[in-house]
Amino acid sequence: MAKRLTGLLTPIIAVLLGIIVGTIIMLVSGYDPVAAYTALWNGAFGDIYYVGEVIRQFTPYILAGLAVAFAFRVGLFNIGVEGQFIVGWLAAVWVGVAFDLPKIIHLPLAILASIVAGAIWAFIPGLLKARFRVHEVIVTIMMNYVALHATNYIIRNYLAAKSGDKTEPIHQTASLRSEWLESLTDYSRLHWGIVLAIACCFIMWFLLEKTTRGFELRAVGFNQDAAQYAGMNVNRNIILSMVISGAFAGLAGAMDGLGTFGYAAVKGGFTGVGFEGIAIALLGANSALGVFFSAILFGALKVGSLNMPLEAGVPNELVNIIIALIVFFVASSYIIRVFLDRFNKKGVK
Amino acid sequence: MSLMDILTIVVPSTLLWAAPLIFTALGGIFSERSGVVNIGLEGLMVVGAFTAIVFNLTFVGTFGNATPWVALVVAMIVGGVFSILHAVASITFRADHTVSGVAINLLATGLTLFLVKMIYDKGETGIIKESFSKIDIPILKDIPIIGEIFFQNTYWTSFLAIIVAVIAWYVVFKTPFGLRLRSVGEHPMAADTMGINVTKMRYLGVIISGALGGLGGAVYAQSITSNFSHATISGQGFMALAAMIFGKWHPLGALGAGIFFGLAQSISIIGSSLPFLKEIPSVYLLIAPYVLTILALTGFIGRADAPKASGTHYIKGSR
């Protein structure tokens, strides 16, 4: 019971500390924190339109968070979600542009393409880890940049419309957009992807907690040697976990490719979704439910922050600072636990 | 266009692009040799670039021609101080090094852009007036052929990077400090029993990496971009990380890798004006550093092994 409570308290304390330090930064730099946080709230929940945008924003966040969390549970750090996200985005858009099919085939095909692309992109570091014991962190970082430059090259040279640096819009038959959802939220860019994202939360939970394969994956995450001794194939599980992680990340790319934007553009730098995914997975303690809730928090922060310069004159980068601080505090949860333990002991006396 | 002409264009340009990578990669070596993984190099470069540009814009009236050099020193100090966050989190608070590094990167971009908007009321700074400009190295420039290729139309910072790399090699491999640093990164418990303060050595390793990362960012901003915005540092830190690994955690290896990656970067930009090279799609040059690093790690190009205790926490008394 006490352990569970601490487990829940740590992320909450980390978020509070992040907000407190954010407040201090605003006070020091002469901004009004109350006005800023009010603007943040209004920008996320003040209007049904903003609510729709928040949901749209956290749809890929859920999937990116699941991708990082899934690998974490098997003891791997997939820092390459960003790259898998980008290739998934491009693959989905490519299928969306290149084929003329009825919706019932076209949309699933485009989604499948994103999943396969992400999975392949993550298979490489998984294979290198399993076969050559190469650290997956470094390989996935390098793969991110390869993905960025390679997709830019493909878009610019093979898929770009006449304007030069983005593809044609995808066909309606491959789109996740929904006029009904849009009209429901005062014409935000809300799309059907959210249903897929929630379904993936269930899939991850079911796969890890309720299947033999999931038990093996978790066992490898807890102790590779013990898993090996128990007769599990550690290498196969490492590769499998990276492939599933990459599949989630690729699907996240389809959310933006088929839902929010409906095209793929040449990117000057990373989208950041993959890195937010790391923060989301950490804050959500790598569980499907935790990822879901922390994705909502990050989506609300991101969308709400856009209102801060307008209403309170505070640069929206403040939210990025707060997110970074939350990551710091979650990562340093050891010290938070130490304090909580001290506090508890004093309470007993 | 003769070979000579090509070399006189390519060599200075390579060295220009290589210098920031070399500085930052050397920083990574100090941190990783002490056993702390530093994914935050990118963020440290961002902080260095930001500091240098803001200092340069603000104090150009006071220091005149010397401004870029003073800005380098200031950026080193700020980078070193900023990296203490990483040290506190990953050494004292026992945070996962990679996670803490990711946080450093997020915090650096968030904080610097926040400050840019606060100070200048827009998303980017103005262009600095005093930047590192092309020079001819005295005396050496008169050497026939070599002088023309290596010492004319070049930058002081490139040569500073090479000198610093040699110094770093001497410090890491030929001094008691370097031996202690490496021992803490290979086997902290053995080092501790010999009376070496593991925590102190690791803090020093991280702070030196912060200073060198800040230096790398400052050089980049003041010789290549001349202003600061969200796009100033876009992946150079990770490329420096790649150079560190490709150079097998060795200062001179990092020097070589830095120059090689600098060549790839500069050709991807100036290649279109050169014969032969303009046939190569620039994407291959852009991804070459990353692909080569993966291959090096895999063992296809000589095996690269990290310091043994890199990424682990040293908890006194635990085995």
Image (spheres, helix red, strand yellow):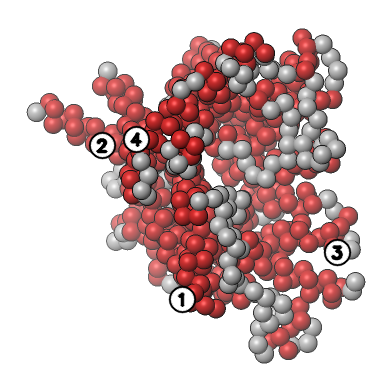
Can marks 1 and 3 be said to lie on one chain?
yes
Contact check, label 2 and label 4, Cβ < 8 Å: no
Place of residue B288 in the rendered image (x, y in percent of width and height, measured from the top left): 73, 52
Residue receiving disc 3:
B274
The crowd level at tag 2 (other Cα within 10 Å; few <14, some 14-19, many 20+) is few
Q: Quadrant of the N terminus of chain A?
A: top left
Of all chains, the one bearing label 4 is: A
Q: How far apart are marks 2 and 3 (CA)?
A: 61 Å
> Quadrant of the rendered structure where residue A106 is?
top right
On the image, numbered disc 4 is attached to which residue? A34
CA gap between label 2 and label 4 equals 31 Å
Q: CA separation, marks 4 and 3?
A: 57 Å
Q: Is residue A139 left or right of residue B175?
A: right
Mark linked to residue B62: 1
Q: What element carries label 1?
A: helix
Real-space CA distance between mark 1 and mark 2, rounded to the nearest whole angstrom: 49 Å
Q: Where is residue B13 in the image (x, y as percent from the top left)?
A: 72, 68
Whether residues under marks 1 and 3 lie with C-beta atoms below 8 angstroms apart, the answer is no
Tag 4 or tag 2, which sits nearer the N-term?
4
| Residues marked 2 and 3 touching at CB (< 8 Å) | no
Q: Nearer the viewer, residue B35 or B229?
A: B229
Q: Mark 2 points at which residue?
A: A338
Q: Which numbered mark, 4 or 3, is in the foreground of this view?
A: 4
| Chain name for mark 1 | B
Residue nearer the viewer, B217 or B161: B217
Q: In this view, does A94 lie above or below B205?
A: above
Q: Which amino acid does label 2 sit on?
A: Val
Observer-side mark, 2 or 4, equals: 4
